Amino acid sequence: LGVDIAVVARTLDVIRATARAAQAVGARAEPLQADASVREEIEEAVDRAVRRFGRLDILIAAAGIYGPIGTVLDNDPAAWEQTIRINLMGTFYAIRAVLPAMIAQRRGKIVAFSGGGAVSPRPRFSAYATSKAAVVRLIETVAAEFADCGIDVNVVAPGPVPTRLHEEVLRQAARVGDVELLTPAAFL
């Protein structure tokens, strides 16, 4: 493939497996453990990736959680704050960490993930919806701020993806209420 990939996640065995899968198809892959909600860990991961590969062309900021499910009154404030830290602040930390390398190169691509919560109210998912709406505005702002630096900045909403995150919502269907859920069969 001729690509170099820094795989960053909180769980070491997950990133090692992902790195092995990338290596199996010919990519050089570096597993880097970091928690998206911890600025220093994200900065260190980006520094290690740049040292390892010599440059940084693309950031895909995909870390995210749904956070507490239920009404605002039912939500644990600490869990709500953690959702903001991972989904919004994690995206901010990653973008902030990669920008100096991309500015110096006069090119780069940044892609962040939003979601259904970014485009309409998401009852019983207030932390998720709020964080994802904020990610969209962050990306729009960063795109405007660095438009003259050769850096493309975009946000995508991929729709439901069969991940552990989605499986958790399916397990908590009784708490979700009337929110439309896709079953795993919908992914076929």
Image (cartoon, rainbow, N blue to C red):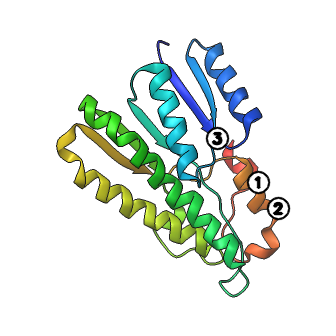
**Relative to 101, is 146 on the left or the right?**
left
Label 2 to label 3: alpha-carbon separation: 23 Å
Q: Residue at x 24, y 48 (%)?
A: 146
Label 1 to label 2: alpha-carbon separation: 6 Å
- Look at the numbered disc 1 and give the secondary structure of its residue: helix
Kind of residue indicated by mark 1: Glu
In the depicted view, which residue is nearer to us: 172 or 59? 59
Q: Which residue is mark 2?
A: 171
In the depicted view, which residue is nearer to us: 155 or 86? 86
**Relative to 167, is 104 on the left or the right?**
left
In the depicted view, which residue is nearer to us: 29 or 136? 29
Q: Is residue 157 above or below residue 130?
A: above
Q: Residue at x 41, y 51 (%)?
A: 155
Percent x, y of residue 20: 69, 20
Asked if marks 1 and 2 touch (Cβ < 8 Å), the reply is yes
Q: Is residue 17 above or below residue 72?
A: above
* Image depth: mark 2 or mark 3 in front: 3
- Look at the numbered disc 2 and give the secondary structure of its residue: helix
Asked if marks 2 and 3 touch (Cβ < 8 Å), the reply is no
Kind of residue indicated by mark 3: Ala
Q: Which residue is mark 3?
A: 9
Label 3 to label 1: alpha-carbon separation: 19 Å
Q: Which image quarter: residue 66?
A: bottom right
Q: Quadrant of the C terminus?
A: top right
Q: Which residue is mark 1?
A: 167
